[in-house]
Image (cartoon, rainbow, N blue to C red):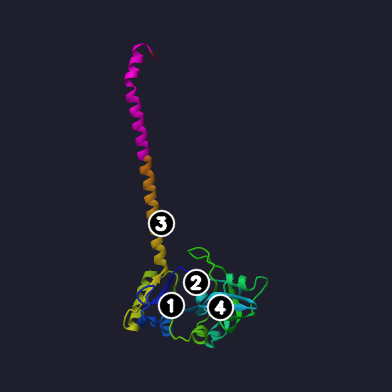
Amino acid sequence: MGTNTIDIHPGKDFGDDNPQYRQALKYDDLVAIQKQPWVNSATPSVSKSLRLRYGNIDIAVNANGVSGDYFNVYGMSFREGNTFNAVQQQDRAQVVVLDANTRRQLFPNKANVVGEVVLVGNMPVIVIGVAEEKPSMYGNSNLLQVWLPYSTMSDRIMGQSWLNSITVRVKDGVDSDQAEQQLTRLLTLRHGKKDFFTWNMDSVLKTAEKTTYTLQLFLTLVAVISLVVGGIGVMNIMLVSVTERTREIGIRMAVGAR
């Protein structure tokens, strides 16, 4: 999951299945966003669970239709090959990028898999790259992911003209909250209404940091209070012990005890 990124989804919130919002995001929205001066890069996304096959190996994967900028948006690099280029996107090329987990599942004994042909659903595609593993904020994921050009995924596999989401990477030095406001204003003007919502990763991380800091302060305060209460308890016990033995000590001193 990238930082300095803003995700845009159709609807009012996650889980909103209202059909009037399902087709809210279009490819033209992406083009308009990419023209904004504060945008580093942006990628569309459509996705579907599909079977991926190579020889006698058949596995379930999450197939994502994205642009070549996807890997820049999320700060991902490649261990083999590279991403798809503009020509491949325009031509709806049958090419695919694998994640490291998928590569291990399909090709456990191959040194290089670029150029291999696999089946995504029933469509043969050529492997052009393998993305490096990138730990997420939730830890390492065992989810199997593959990426195809957005045009290939939407036209050849899914047959849909709308986007499931758009992810925007904001330029360094640009305040992500201000960018989010401008993004919301831009799309609201284009759509004539607010039929989408945004997810600002920087804001999420800042909130998490504040929550963690508050929790640390609370735990520190609890520890201090516990020490103070414990100290007072020990003092009271010692005081009671001395008070109870005052008479005994006086008698002993009276008879010459030291």
State the residue at coordinates (33%, 80%). 188
x, y (%) of residue 35?
42, 81
Q: Is mark 1 on a helix, strand or loop?
A: strand
**Measured Cα–Cα span from mark 3 to mark 2:** 25 Å
The magenta stretch spans which residues? Answer: 228-256
Disc 1 vs disc 2: Cβ atoms closer than 8 Å? Answer: no
**Measured Cα–Cα span from mark 2 to mark 4:** 25 Å
Lower position in the chain sequence, tag 1 or tag 2: 2
The residue lying furthest to the top in this view is 255
Q: Which amino acid does label 1 sit on?
A: Ser
**Measured Cα–Cα span from mark 1 to mark 2:** 14 Å
Q: Depth check: 16 or 192 in front?
A: 16
Q: Of the residues tagged 2 and 4, which is closer to the observer?
A: 4
Q: Which amino acid does label 3 sit on?
A: Thr
**Measured Cα–Cα span from mark 4 to mark 1:** 22 Å
Residue wearing tag 2: 74
**Residue 236 is inside the magenta segment:** yes
Q: What residue type is labelled 4?
A: Arg
x, y (%) of residue 25?
40, 81
State the residue at coordinates (51%, 74%). 72
Residue wearing tag 3: 212
Magenta residues, dominant SS class: helix
Lower position in the chain sequence, tag 3 or tag 1: 1
Residue 206 visible in rendering: yes
Residue wearing tag 4: 51
Q: What element carries label 4?
A: strand
